[in-house]
Image (cartoon, rainbow, N blue to C red):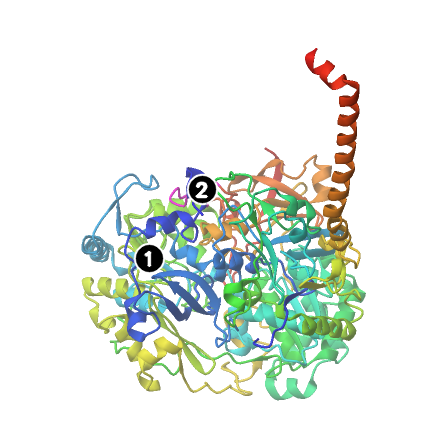
């Protein structure tokens, strides 16, 4: 079968298709030498290599099929608890990230104006020297705190943190405040842990999902668990203003009014306490603050909540009774984001407390294993003392937000304001703040304040497009990362193929940079394999064996049982920590703002075919994604004279976008919905550029004062025909 | 998996979340071009009126019929039904007549209108991943499915499993295993909470369509031969008559 490649085909075809295969076949296959040494790839470059997915942060185990030195297929690793032999669409398409024709494969130094996209290739030495020189110049002139560092949750993050804390900067931006700060701070205040593990055992009978769209925001094993629980007959109650795919599988879909899920949960607590449906023994033994909670929630009757939520008092009362009756085989899922309003912390607290009241602990939820526990690490000196205030207001404005979470949007705002001091440099790794932070114009303004910006990524994402130096990272199929313990195994991410071009692992990049900054003591490993050997040392495991098998056995960390790392050592229904800094110690009603006449709630939410802002350029995912359109209730649309595929202008107080409309029954009449992650600015993303519109252009920055969470659902927009 | 006598799929519409992992997996496994797919999502999608809504979607690919109409219709024998289930297609033999597309009651074979006859490979459809199933692996779409909506196994066992699942939750499922008998049976079996026509499946008789057509087709040669005899006799008769009357000659000379 011959295949002629037209220009159109060439653009459409990825490396998995004929185009890049033809290109690739001109070069001798670059076999992953490490895999060959381990015997998993033979002399011809064929074999199967165990590694880990990085298409989202769930990190499924995978087995990569390599033919002639190229990855041709990824399958889920049945031995990995996160994948159980399955991969989601993103995981399946992962090799297209590696073979993306838009990969950055050599260090780049900007030659045009910022945002013009004009770069020249450079050697690693030149690029790293330039980055180190600029960072040191900023440190000397303005202090280390004038360098801002930001990165999204990933396995090499401990080394990234070494870089910034050793450098002496307190300014650390993560994605967390744009995602789940409310959930994490709530669990810390209630259970003394970031996120208890959820257990979907055979007896699980009742699940309340508050905006947790688990069947579209896929976490492979948990998505599987939920479907199997439904299959066994567990009842799912799902709150969401949209009829998502999760809604379609739930026994009961409650299209709650955005921001009012707090009222719903407060009313559940009310019914459970008023009707004495809680587990009295558990509450007495393992919690503190029941009386304060009782006093507060007595005013939150179902009749009070009904007009706020749009859910009848009978339904709320019934669900409270059903949930309590099913307990302890019941689970109220915290979700990552619920609907994000400035009251979200209280919503999350109410959910955390709901589980505690009915005694679900150690039945449907338990202590999560500590990340990295039991593994070795290279020796390193303590970090230097940092006295500068953090630009993101932690803790001086956000006293209960942990340092490692931070408040990213506040950091950006204070860069723009230059308060309490001016930042001058930004080091960004695996992150795309131009797309992820609300109010894109403001983020670009913050970029404008910078003397120097450097981005580490595998493709020319929007942030890289506006950077001065781009350092090309090896993709997750081309590099080692630190080990990931899951249960009684520590899993490896290892190169399935050699890095293409000049791409390098983060472990290598951070070490090189650390040495140039005079911080070599914080990176005491020869190379990636040496780092892994030091991690494996306490387990007595041999790296070559681990490479072959995909994991090292390790002793499973013991469950905490019935102890909690809170000040009282118990589950805190009332939190003294919160009260001491002036916040309500128990969940409290705070009425969220509502749109004015003619405005809509702007909702965003996940689809199964993309992860945040980094996968839209993946050609396989692009192929199987729905066209991003603005959802609007069909009747509302008709009343405004709008129809599906009409171009509309969506405007908020900070920006406007143009996008096609989708008139659908599957959304509340007072809401519109936009799939996030589209509307890229970077013309270096040839597949994604020009597709859809960016939610970050219209999102207004509102921050939950307690948890620092960005209130992503609190933006109100007008919609008119474009 | 070694004891599979008859390879088959079972699709449970109540478990499918329309995530499309199967579609991506198929595309990668079989190196499908970017503008093609062998799996697609069928069904009505979201129906009803807010807030009383329902969703019906189905992962659709070749049904691997027990009596494949594509195979009956194909004039050059490009289709083969393996005794253990898979219906395969041979592009080297195909002449691009597209009879199979018309014959398939499920609309499965797709024709590449962009390519001419010279470029080959006219039809594209699910192969049942022979490179995987005969090497102890599940088909790519099944292996990756995060919710076990797609399962793979022996046809008889899957039919049994499907009936057991329906019996365990009669309130949840329509009491029917689509493909057990439709069109003489298929190797892609479906159970569902919504009517099968809402998933985009045709209502078909139990007797395979091609059983009728094949009976007719079997008559073709005797029919042609007998007609040939009749026509030959007529021609010979007419010629003899004309020769006798000299009419043929007269017309020829005109």
| Image-based side of A440 in relation to A207, left or right | left
Q: Residues within 10 Å of mark 1 (few under 14, many from 20)?
A: many
Q: Secondary structure at mark 2?
A: helix
Mark identifier at residue A9: 2
As drawn, A696 above or below A316: above
Which quarter of the rendered picture does the C terminus of chain A lie within? top right
Residue A148 got which mark? Answer: 1
Q: Quadrant of residue A62?
A: bottom left
In the depicted view, which residue is nearer to us: B22 or A305?
B22
Q: Is B236 above or below relative to A331?
A: above
Residue A199 seen in render: yes
Which quadrant would residue A308 be assigned to in this image? bottom right
**In the image, residue A452 lies at what x, y percent?**
28, 50
Q: Nearer the viewer, mark 1 or mark 2?
A: 2
Q: Is residue B164 magenta?
A: no
Tell me residue A158's x, y (percent). 34, 70
Marked residue chain, label 1: A
Given residues A699 and A269, the one toward you in this image is: A699
Residue B52 spot, x, y in % from top left:
77, 55
What segment carries the magenta color? Answer: A681-690
Asked whether residue B202 is in view, the answer is no
Label 2 is found on which chain of the structure? A
Residue drawn 75% across and 47% down? B222
Is A684 part of what is drawn in magenta? yes
Q: Secondary structure at mark 1?
A: strand
């Amino acid at each position: 079968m011959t295949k002629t490649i037209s220009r159109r085909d060439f653009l459409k075809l990825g490396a998995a298709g004929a185009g890049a295969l033809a290109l690739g076949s001109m070069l001798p296959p670059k076999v992953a030498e490490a895999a060959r040494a381990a015997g998993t790839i033979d002399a011809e470059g064929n074999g199967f290599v165990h590694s880990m997915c990085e298409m989202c942060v769930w990190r499924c185990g995978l087995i990569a099929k390599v033919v002639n030195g190229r990855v041709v297929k990824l399958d889920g690793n049945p031995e990995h608890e996160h994948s159980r032999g399955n991969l989601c669409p993103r995981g399946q398409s992962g090799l297209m990230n590696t073979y993306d024709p838009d990969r950055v494969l050599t260090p780049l130094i900007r030659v045009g104006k910022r945002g013009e996209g004009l770069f020249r290739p450079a050697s690693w030495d030149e690029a790293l020297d330039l980055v180190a020189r600029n960072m040191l110049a900023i440190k000397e002139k303005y202090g280390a705190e004038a360098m801002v560092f930001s990165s999204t949750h990933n396995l090499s993050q401990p080394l990234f943190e070494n870089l910034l804390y050793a450098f002496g900067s307190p300014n650390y931006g993560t994605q967390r405040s744009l995602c789940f700060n409310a959930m994490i701070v709530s669990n810390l205040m209630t259970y003394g842990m970031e996120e208890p593990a959820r257990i979907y055992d055979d007896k699980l009978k009742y699940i309340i999902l508050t905006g947790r769209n688990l069947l579209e925001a896929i976490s492979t094993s948990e998505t599987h668990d939920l479907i199997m629980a439904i299959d066994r007959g567990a009842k799912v109650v799902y709150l969401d203003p949209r009829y998502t795919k999760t809604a379609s599988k739930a026994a009961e879909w409650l299209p709650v009014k955005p921001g009012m899920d707090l009222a719903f949960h407060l009313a559940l607590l009310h019914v459970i306490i008023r009707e004495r449906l809680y587990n009295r023994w558990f509450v007495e033994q393992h919690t503190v603050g029941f009386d304060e909670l009782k006093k507060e929630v007595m005013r939150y009757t179902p009749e009070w909540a009904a007009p706020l939520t749009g859910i009848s008092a009978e339904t709320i009362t019934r669900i409270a009774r059903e949930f309590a009756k099913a307990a302890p085989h019941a689970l109220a899922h915290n979700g990552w984001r619920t609907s994000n309003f400035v009251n979200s912390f209280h919503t999350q607290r109410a959910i955390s407390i709901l589980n505690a009241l009915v005694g679900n602990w150690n039945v449907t939820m338990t202590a999560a294993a500590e990340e990295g526990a039991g593994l070795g690490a290279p020796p390193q000196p303590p970090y230097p003392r940092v006295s500068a205030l953090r630009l993101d207001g932690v803790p001086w404005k956000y006293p209960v937000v942990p340092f490692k979470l931070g408040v990213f949007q506040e950091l950006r705002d204070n860069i723009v304001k230059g308060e309490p001091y001016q930042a001058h440099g930004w080091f960004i790794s695996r992150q795309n703040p131009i797309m992820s932070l609300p109010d894109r114009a403001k983020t670009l303004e913050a970029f404008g304040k910078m003397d120097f910006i450097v981005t580490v990524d595998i493709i020319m994402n929007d942030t890289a497009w506006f950077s001065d130096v781009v350092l090309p990272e090896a993709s997750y199929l081309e590099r080692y990362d630190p080990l990931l313990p899951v249960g009684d195994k520590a899993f490896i991410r290892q190169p399935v193929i050699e890095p293409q071009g000049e791409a390098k692992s983060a472990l290598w990049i951070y070490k090189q940079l650390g040495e140039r900054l005079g911080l070599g003591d914080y990176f005491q490993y020869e190379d990636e394999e040496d780092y892994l050997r030091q991690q494996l040392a306490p387990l007595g495991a041999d790296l070559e064996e681990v490479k072959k098998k995909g994991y090292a056995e390790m002793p499973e960390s013991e469950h905490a049982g019935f102890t909690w790392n809170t000040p009282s050592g118990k589950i805190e229904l009332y939190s003294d920590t919160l009260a001491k800094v002036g916040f309500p110690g128990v969940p409290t009603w705070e009425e969220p703002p509502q749109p004015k006449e003619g405005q809509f709630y702007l909702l965003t939410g996940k689809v199964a075919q993309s992860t945040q802002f980094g996968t839209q350029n993946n050609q396989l995912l692009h192929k199987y994604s729905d066209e991003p359109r603005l959802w609007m209730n069909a009747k509302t649309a008709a009343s405004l004279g709008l129809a599906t595929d009409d171009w509309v202008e969506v405007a908020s107080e900070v920006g406007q976008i143009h996008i096609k409309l989708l008139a659908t029954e599957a959304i509340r009449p007072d809401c519109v919905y936009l799939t996030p992650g589209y509307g890229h600015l970077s013309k270096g993303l040839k597949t994604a550029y020009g597709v859809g519109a960016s939610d970050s252009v219209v999102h207004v920055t509102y921050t939950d004062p307690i948890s620092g969470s960005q209130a992503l659902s609190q933006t109100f927009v007008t919609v008119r025909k474009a | 998996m070694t004891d599979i006598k008859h390879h088959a799929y079972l699709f449970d519409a109540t478990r499918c979340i329309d995530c499309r992992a199967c579609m991506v997996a198929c595309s990668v496994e079989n190196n499908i071009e970017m503008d093609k797919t062998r799996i697609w999502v069928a069904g009505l999608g979201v129906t009803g009126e807010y807030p009383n809504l329902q969703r019906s979607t189905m992962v659709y690919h070749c049904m691997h019929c027990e009596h494949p109409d594509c195979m009956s219709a194909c004039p050059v024998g490009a289709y083969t039904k393996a005794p253990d289930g898979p219906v395969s297609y041979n592009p080297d033999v195909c002449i691009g007549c597209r009879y199979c597309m018309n014959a398939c009651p499920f609309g499965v074979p797709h024709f590449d209108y962009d390519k001419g006859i010279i470029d080959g490979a006219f039809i594209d459809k699910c192969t049942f991943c022979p490179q995987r199933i005969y090497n102890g692996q599940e088909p790519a779409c099944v292996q990756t499915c995060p919710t076990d909506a797609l399962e793979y196994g022996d046809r008889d066992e899957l039919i049994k499993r499907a009936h057991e699942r329906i019996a365990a939750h009669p309130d949840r499922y329509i009491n029917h295993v689509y493909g057990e008998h439709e069109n003489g049976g298929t190797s892609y079996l479906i159970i569902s909470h919504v009517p099968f026509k809402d998933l985009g499946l045709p209502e078909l008789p139990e007797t395979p369509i091609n059983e009728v057509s094949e009976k007719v087709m079997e008559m073709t040669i005797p029919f042609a031969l007998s007609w040939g005899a009749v026509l030959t006799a007529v021609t010979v008769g007419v010629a003899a008559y004309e020769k006798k009357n000299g009419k043929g000659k007269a017309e020829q000379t005109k």
